[in-house]
Image (spheres, helix red, strand yellow):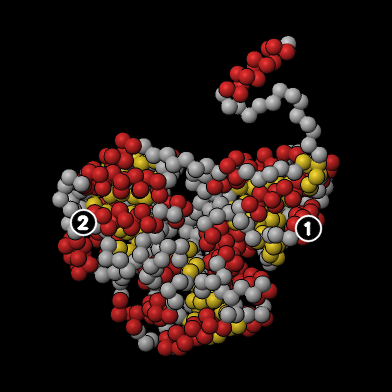
Amino acid sequence: MGEKQKIDMETELASHNFEVSLSPTPIARPTIPAIQLLLKYLEAEGVEYIFGIPGGPLMPIYEALKERNVIKPILAKHEEGAAFMADGYARMRHGLGVCCVTTGPGATNAVTGIAAAYADGVPVMIITAQVATSAFGRGAFQETTSEYMSVVDLFKPITKASMMLMRADKMGETVRHLLRIAMSGQPGPVHLNIPADLARKMIPDEPIDQSQYKSTTHVFDREAVKKAAQALIRAKRPAILAGNGVNSSGAHSELRQLSEKLSIPVATTVKGKSTFPEDHILSVGVFGFAGSPRAEACLLSGNVDVLLTVGTSLGEMETNGWDPHLKPQEALLQLDVDQQRIGANYSADIPLIGDAKTVLREILFQIEREMKWMEDKNERHLSHIKELRRKHPWCVDEEKMLSNDIPMKPQRLMYELGEALPQESVVFVDIGNSMSWAFHYLRMTRPYSFFHAIGLGPMGFGVVASIGAKFANPKSPVIALVGDAAFLMNGNEIHTACEYGVPVVWVVQNNGGHGMIYHGEKVQFGGKFHNSLFKQPVNFVAFARSLGAEGYIVDRPEEFGGVFRKALGSGKPTVIDVRIDLQEMPPIGSRFKALNRYFDDREQSSK
Ligand SMILES: Cc1ncc(C[n+]2csc(CCOP(=O)(O)OP(=O)(O)O)c2C)c(N)n1
Ligand SMILES: [Mg+2]
């Protein structure tokens, strides 16, 4: 290139404000091990802990953690536990959670934990180790490359992105790519597999610039927002169904403002429980699985003319098994960050694609503009809501909440728990009847106070994710409401909580086995067979104590409050074994109905 040509081109590029240099880039000197650059990015994300279990090729990450001395490694007891803890940590801090596991069995053990994060849209990064590149395809111990049992492929269907680091000097680029994917749109887990020889390889250091991978754009469709605002203003019987998308986008205050602006009743899905205060006059409780009769009366009455759904997949659990009556008379306004979900289960009349916080804010803005010229409609639906509250109870079998029966009614346990929970508590529930009781009877009033993994539905999640959450939020009391069978799946992680002084309180609902399955056997199969109850009782107090925790038995209703408060006050990890009545069945009939239709292979259409 001639000198003149070069100057012209430089001037031209400079006028477009391009960042460009035509002189050769000086070769940057390798000054940092690749694995440390990864940690630098995680530090910038505010990650304080990495949950995991070591193994040969994973050791460089522990060496790097020691050298940098910023993020602390937490030694889990099982890789599923490590993944669940990273998930609970991420949900609680509304940011990234990280776990690391070794190649082979470390990675396969973590699969359920990562799949659960995927199903619930939780941004977790899983780092797995790999044998050295020189050993690929040569039968190295625990090799899981594309040559054999590809671990990258294993994680593909259960993450938003799964990849192997191909060159040490690509670490920065690779991590930015994965972080961008994990935290944009519908968040979710990502997987990075690191060959052992690349981890310690020295590469050029680089400054961390979060603007290279974090998006701050807030996209919405103005026309759709206008239509939605007008539909909501015009509606005679509007309603809102709020899902987990409110949590993912932090749209709690916008949801509340919108509901209050037009006095629209709000039901939440099970995943959305705690996104709207359940003691609010406009709350009708949980709709769907184990939901409130009030929410059901509100949404399935056939009177709703405009229904706004916010961040819900409208799957089986969120719709009472795709009840066709959920379809409103006039218009379904479906707000979701994921375009692919729009219209998937119920045809949407006004699709609202985008982040819940952004779109709700715009709808509110539009409503305020339009209502300037109208009489105040603030109070207009209140009489209808009052009537709904008068006619339809919040929960079924309310009287059982005060029952003195022994064994204790689970409803009474929920009542006692509701009375004893401090305001700022965070509750994790597990899968089984234990969660169903909580969905139905516990009233949660603060955002980010109620968590579970109903997306995948893995037993053991609540037992362990609660520990991760307590790491993220040491100030709030963290309580895990778990079934006895679920507790036995991952109770070993109590040891981890004890080692790090993380005082979770586990309320084990002891009904002698898999209660939910037992009821299914009775309701669906007439009790022809039972393969759900334990043949031998479990001594949970001895189990807890053997791992370093406190343990108590509660077998009388009036004892629970005192023991629970003592456990919370002790600041020690504590297991409370509560003996409850197996024969009580939570209101989960819609689930059994949906299952029956599966067995009969009947069409499950909602449209
Ligand atoms: C890992 C896993 N295995 C099996 C199931 C199916 N399942 C759902 S609930 C349940 C029983 C739960 O029993 P428990 O934890 O004691 O709670 P309970 O229903 O007795 O309150 C089972 C086996 C599941 N959800 N997850
Ligand atoms: Mg049980």
Nearer to us in this view, 461 or 226: 226
Residue positioned 79% across, 33% down in the render: 27
Q: Is mark 2 on a helix, strand or loop?
A: loop
Check whether the beta carbons of the residues at disc 1 and disc 2 lie within 8 A of each other. no
| Image location (x, y in percent) of residue 396 | 30, 71
Residue 245 visible here: yes
| Image location (x, y in percent) of residue 62 | 76, 58
Circle 2 packing at 10 Å, graded few (<14), some (14-19), many (20+), is few
Residue 67's tag is 1
Residue 63 in the image: above or below residue 352: below
Residue positioned 41% across, 42% down in the render: 354
Residue positioned 38% across, 86% down in the render: 405
Nearer to us in this view, 12 or 529: 12
**Looking at the figure, which quarter contains the N terminus?**
top right
Residue positioned 50% across, 54% down in the render: 120
Residue 378's tag is 2
Say whether residue 212 is left or right of residue 397.
Answer: right
| Image location (x, y in percent) of residue 389 | 22, 67
Say whether residue 186 is left or right of residue 139.
Answer: left
